[in-house]
Amino acid sequence: MFKSLIRSMRLRTLPLSLSGIVCGGVYAYSLGNSNLWANPQRFTLALIFLILTTISLQILSNLSNEMGDHLNGVDNEKREGPNYGMTEGGLTEKQMWRAINTFVIICALCGLLMTLFAHCPYWILLLGAAAIWAATHYTLGKKPYGYRGLGDLFVFLFFGLVSVIGSYFVIHSTLIGAPILPAVGIGLLSVAVLNVNNIRDMASDEGIRQTVPLRLGERRAKWYHTALVVVGLLCLTLGRMNYIHVEDGYSLWRLFAYLFTLPLYIWHLVGVWRHHGKALDPMLPLLVMSTFLLSIIYTWGNYGI
């Protein structure tokens, strides 16, 4: 059971959820002038629970997604993606429900502790509740939004705007100067991860749920995918423009060092255009790791020489 549960957590997707908080959190840390700086211990605990909350939400989303697909018959013989715990028969419905409920509690507890240690206003708990709802209702519930082609919108909101700007707010204690363009960029790249997953699963999804690739058709879905990646990278680049001042002491090569990840994105896009169905599966972790690496290099560039 334990090995099946680990497979259902889909650990290969976790770096994507961390990309947003790396981008927003490290950006806020580079600015300084936060109330958290006066208490390193409180800052450390706030950061730990921010990371744990993010990871727990991603795992909750993955478990709920598998449960919803199982209940709605998406995980059938046409499935092109990898098999997880329930598909392999290693997890029963009862065990999966228990795991989902456990991670709902973990998400809520970690989010509350993050709020307390970071001294965030309590309205941020409403945002946390919305994130838990979004994580569990992609494929679960009476009207899962993922089955109505709304997954892209929710991924953009929660993996992009909420993740980056929310992390910035937790660390910096203000929304002033929030990295909006980088948040949009990370959001679009996160949507691209979902999109390549949905292109891969078009055969098994057809007739059961609606996704953007099913609405567009495979060829136009790949053009949409290309646009997500290109515009996402463009937004990140535009977000760098306000740093190009000699007096600020920023090194241009350091500011734009993240562009060294471009060959990975080109490799990814070439693979998306060349492959179909199950052969697209390796393109998903490639995009996830490319985005995680980009977020690390991108935020590293926020520091002066």
Image (tube, rainbow, N blue to C red):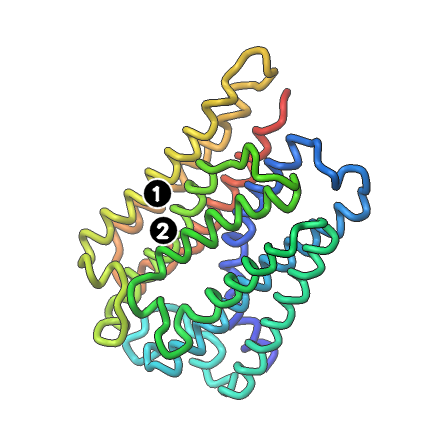
Q: Is residue 76 left or right of residue 99?
A: left
In the image, farthest residue toward the top: 247
| In-front residue for pair 4/164 | 164
Q: Residue at x 67, y 50 (%)?
A: 120
User: How many numbered marks does the figure carry?
Assistant: 2
Quadrant where the N terminus sits is bottom right
Label 2 secondary element: helix
Alpha carbon of mark 2 to alpha carbon of mark 1: how far?
A: 7 Å
Q: Is residue 97 above or below residue 286?
A: below
Image location of residue 270, percent across then percent down: 29, 45
Q: Position of residue 184 (x, y in %)?
A: 42, 42
Q: Is residue 165 above or below residue 137?
A: above
Quadrant of the rendered image containing residue 55:
bottom right
Callout 1 amino acid? Val
Of 88 and 21, the residue lying toward us: 21
Q: Which mark is residue 82?
A: none
Mark 2, Cα crowd under 10 Å, few <14 / some 14-19 / many 20+, is many
Q: Residues within 10 Å of mark 1 (few under 14, many from 20)?
A: many
Nearest to N terminus: mark 2 or mark 1 = 2
Q: Position of residue 272 (x, y in %)?
A: 29, 51
How far across and how far down the image is residue 81, in percent? 36, 68
Question: Is residue 123 or residue 167 the one in the foreground?
Answer: 123
Determine which residue is flagged by label 1: 229
Q: Is residue 72 above or below residue 230?
A: below
The secondary element bearing badge 1 is classed as helix
Q: Amino acid at mark 2?
A: Ala
The reply to whether dot 2 and dot 1 touch (C-beta < 8 Å) is yes
Quadrant where the C terminus is found in the figure: top right
In the image, what residue occupies the spot 59% across and 64% down? 56
Lateral position of residue 78 relative to residue 241, left or right = left
Residue assigned mark 2? 192
